[in-house]
Amino acid sequence: MLVNAKEMLDKAYENGYGIGQFNINNLEWTKAILEACEEKKSAVILGVSEGAAKYMGGFNVVSKMVEGLDKDLNITVPVALHLDHGSYEGAKKALDAGFTSIMFDGSSLPIDENIEKTKEIVELCHSKNVSVEAEVGGIGGEEDGVVSAGELADPEECKKVASLGIDFLAAGIGNIHGVYPEDWQGLNFKRLEEIKEAAGKIPLVLHGGTGIPEEQVKKAIERGVSKININTECQIVFTEATRKYFEEGKDKVGKGFDPRKVLKPGFEAIKDKVREKIEFFECENSAEK
């Protein structure tokens, strides 16, 4: 049974560890993440962007796939199905499709409009026991065609949005989506401290978790970041493992062209990466804490 993300993130916040949001792109992705988290007894958030949902056939397809895998794989750890960077309309559609956690990303809107729409999404979601993530200050890079240079969120705006009853807050502290450029300046911990003080006791979210130096991620977790989003790293290792399969000519041996065989190395690479992140975030056995 899928759950909302509030309880797992509140526990992470109180106990000083992180929970991974691993974005999913297909069935192999989802199965690999669920199996790794069950093995490590870690709670998990499965992130789905609107673009990924469209690629997989729609919000209802994704919801039914995750529910089915959760049941048939006998997953016992808490699993939240979370809309990542949802639009106003997308948030409503994902909610109707059975997602158990929703991110409404109004960071590109004027703050008053962001507040107005976030408040409405909170009321809708909480009426269905669904958790809500909001965003202040754009996250750098590109996510489903939305491009940002990586703003620093305004602490006062964070305070206003946090007061709306959201369950966790994404706030720009210099982080970006995708691969980090060589001249990246790093996370702004002074701004993180200011945001934490302004927003109060609420779990914070680190988007663009791929490529941030480990010591900076650890430092962020120590300062109230409880949810770390991982997508690019899994995509990279999946692609590398799949490329190697073809370069070694394994598709030419026997029935090596069978897609189940073709995708298996990438599947295993994702599992390894998720296990690695669970250990690093110190959320192993979080399902039992």
Image (cartoon, grey):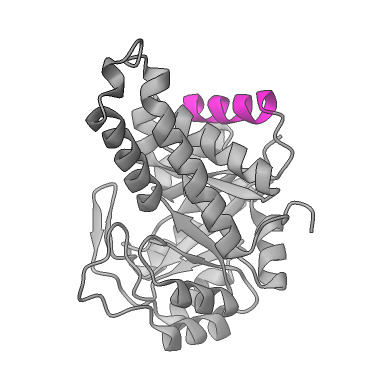
Magenta region:
58-73
Left or right of residue 155, residue 283 in this image: right
Q: Residue furthest right?
A: 288
Residue 68 position, x and y percent, is 62, 24
User: Height in image: 282 above or below 97?
Assistant: below
Classified by dominant secondary structure, the portion drawn in magenta counts as helix
Q: Which residue is painted at 42% across and 41% down in the image?
A: 90
User: Height in image: 42 above or below 28?
Assistant: below
Residue closer to the observer: 62 or 162:
62
Query: Is residue 127 part of the magenta span, yes or no?
Result: no
Residue closer to the observer: 8 or 31:
31
Query: Is residue 61 part of the magenta span, yes or no?
Result: yes
Q: Which residue is painted at 40% across and 35% down in the image?
A: 266
Which part of the image, by quadrant, shows the N terminus?
top right
Q: Which residue is painted at 38% across and 78% down in the image?
A: 187
The answer to whether residue 200 is seen in the rendering is yes
Residue 195 position, x and y percent, is 49, 81
Residue 148 position, x and y percent, is 25, 64
